[in-house]
Amino acid sequence: MVKRHLSQLALLGGSPAFPGKLHVGRPSVPVAENRERLMDRINGALDRKWLSNHGPLVREFEQEVARITGARHAIAVCNATQGLQIAAKACGLTGEVIVPAFTFIATAHALSWIGLTPIFADVTPETHSLDPNSIEALITAHTSAIVAVHLWGIPCPIESIGEIARRHHVQVIYDAAHAFGCSHRGRMIGSNGRAEVFSFHATKFINAGEGGVITTDDSDLAQRIRRMTSFGFTDVDCVSDLGTNAKMSEVTAAMGLTSIEMMEDIIRANRINYLTYEKELAGLSGIRLLSNDSRESRNYQYAVTEIDADQAGLSRDQLLEVLQAEGVLARRYFYPGCHRAEPYLSLQSNRERSLPVTERLSSSVLVLPAGAAVDPDEVSEVCEIIRFALKHADDLVLRSEESVTYAIHGS
Ligand SMILES: *Cc1c(COP(=O)(O)O)cnc(C)c1O
């Protein structure tokens, strides 16, 4: 329903536009023939009684990921967090690792979990990924690597980061959790740095429920990574070094393969949603949609906006309240930034660290429902609500303050 009067907003007592709720990260699940293909694959695994340990479905999944990314080697793992830990260990990282503060907490946790110290750097205002200009001041004698994140599927400034790393003799690993199906200068993400790590978690672009893949062009590194994912075994009864268990199961690979078959359809649907956001939010002052370079491959999985409170007349959190009341479950990713989350916040060095862009983004980024969660009509309706809220921002702020005061003091 089109809102014509402030009192029609759910925040102010109206009925919510989406009583069934719109989510940001709803998994794309196979239906119809795709569902049948998934079941056929699972039945095949059950008939073979081969459920893990680098079975035929995992091998096929790895080949598909290698084909799509163009990487020479692809090693499937149980999730991207384990994938990052194994990639970091296999590269022999020690001491300090420079990471962006504006990322999902798993990037930092994966490094801390294996005894490394994440050193938080700032990001660029344009694309929200690691700012090369903030790296060098953080490099010390203890720095062994830079772990950069292709946030939102927008590739990092790979050349600048590589150049800094070479000059300082440190390694580079990419957290490519968001970047499956994305390209940089016409080349698919997957072969940059020492290794890149993709996530196939349920909420990611291509999903296997849980899952990850480490890609690299380095054969020795690939072998070491593969051994590490499987207890350090090189052969039956032969353990060559320390390993863990990070293997992907056959049922997971069945889901991953089926999702990859759906990839073109998912991109098409995501892109239409994204273009709808772009069209409907164009020209609105106070809200900026992060753009996707149409000359590159993109998966259009995230609709990321920044709210400029001064221009919009209301803050990101106030707009979020309006949307949430309507059943639009937008999210404040990655609030409040890794350096403001434990265990990192307790370190004096992180409390004192000034990361102006990360801090601004933490209070201005709003991720809107996209991907499989919505269709273009719903996107239009979400934008309609945003337009309405921005148009009546002053009244809205006043009215919601009154209603809060009433709720507290009224009887
Ligand atoms: C999801 C995500 C991860 C972790 O992936 P899992 O497969 O869930 O372990 C790591 N980094 C980023 C940026 C992510 O968004």
Image (tube, rainbow, N blue to C red):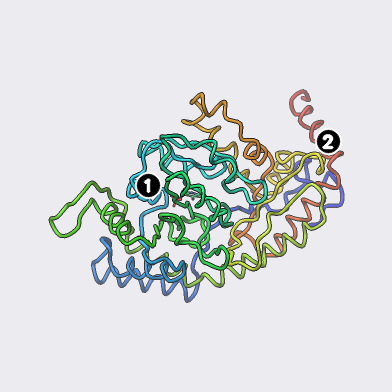
Does residue 5 lie above or below 341 as drawn? below
Give the residue at the far front of this rendering.
167
Q: In the rendering, which numbered label is found on residue 88?
A: 1
Which numbered disc flags the more N-terminal residue, 1 or 2?
1
**Residue corresponding to mark 2:** 399
Rendering coords of residue 411 (x, y %): 77, 24
Quarter of the figure with residue 365? top right
Rendering coords of residue 69 (x, y %): 46, 66
Circle 2 sits in a helix, a strand or a loop, which is it? helix
How many numbered callouts? 2
Kind of residue at disc 2 = Arg
Q: In the rendering, which numbered label is found on residue 132?
A: none
Which residue is nearer to you in this view: 263 or 398? 263
**Label 2 crowd (10 A; few <14 / some 14-19 / many >=20):** some
Rendering coords of residue 144 (x, y %): 41, 41
**Label 1 crowd (10 A; few <14 / some 14-19 / many >=20):** many
Relative placement, left or right, of 351 versus 38 is right
Rendering coords of residue 386 (x, y %): 77, 50
